[in-house]
Amino acid sequence: MRCRIYRVAAAVAAAACVFTAGCANRATGSVAADVDLSRMRSFYVVKLPADSRGVEVLIRDNLVKRGFKAASGPEVPDSPIEADAVVTYADRWTWDMTMYMLELTITMKNPADNFPFATGNSYHTSLTRKSPQEMVDEVLSNIFAHASEKKAASEK
């Protein structure tokens, strides 16, 4: 009898893992304590050489929509970038009936020393998937929201 209960419990646990695995999602954003994003006015988004989907354009356009000056292009080694921040990203795509963006991480760096001062991540599996535009918006919204919360807390 006891063995049957353990088998049923194991089957229920396995089913729960299978059914909830497709629903996983995560959205984060953080900014270094000594950085004030409200002073940023211009961004340069570095295109990944392997990116054929135009993610850098989505990031650039989202920053412009937020009222910033933004440009995108290839990484220019040993060349001063005329921007307040350099934006890099890592996108991960997967297949589930169609190709979709599984994960996006955006990092903002100081152009002078390439030190990362802000980062955000969005991870959505098949059942909670979002379009690439929605993923970009979610990540940037989380970064800027974190910066706003941090600024409001410091003003109290």
Image (cartoon, rainbow, N blue to C red):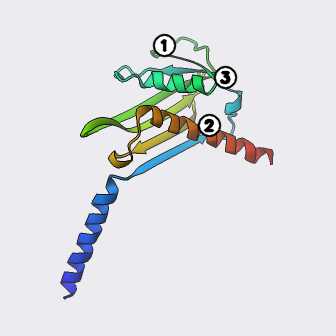
Residue kind at label 1, given as amino acid type: Val
Rendering quarter of residue 83: top right
Residue 7 showing in the rendered view: yes
Give the mark toward the camera: 2 or 1.
Answer: 2
Q: How far apart are marks 2 and 1 (CA)?
A: 26 Å
Depth check: give the residue in front, 33 or 127: 127
- Which SS class for mark 1? loop
Identified at 46% across, 21% down, the residue is: 57
Residue kind at label 3, given as amino acid type: Arg
Depth check: give the residue in front, 16 or 134: 134
The residue to which callout 2 is attached is 144
Tell me if residue 70 comes above or below residue 121 in the rendering.
above
Where residue 129 appears, as percent x and y from the top left, is 38, 43
Rendering quarter of residue 47: top left
Residue 32 showing in the rendered view: no
Residue kind at label 2, given as amino acid type: Phe
Which numbered disc, 1 or 3, marks the residue that appears first in the sequence? 3
Where residue 114 appears, as percent x and y from the top left, is 55, 25
Depth check: give the residue in front, 124 or 2: 124
Badge 2 crowding class, 10 Å Cα cut-off, few under 14, some 14 to 19, many 20 or more, is some
The residue to which callout 3 is attached is 41
In this image, 32 relative to 95: left or right? right
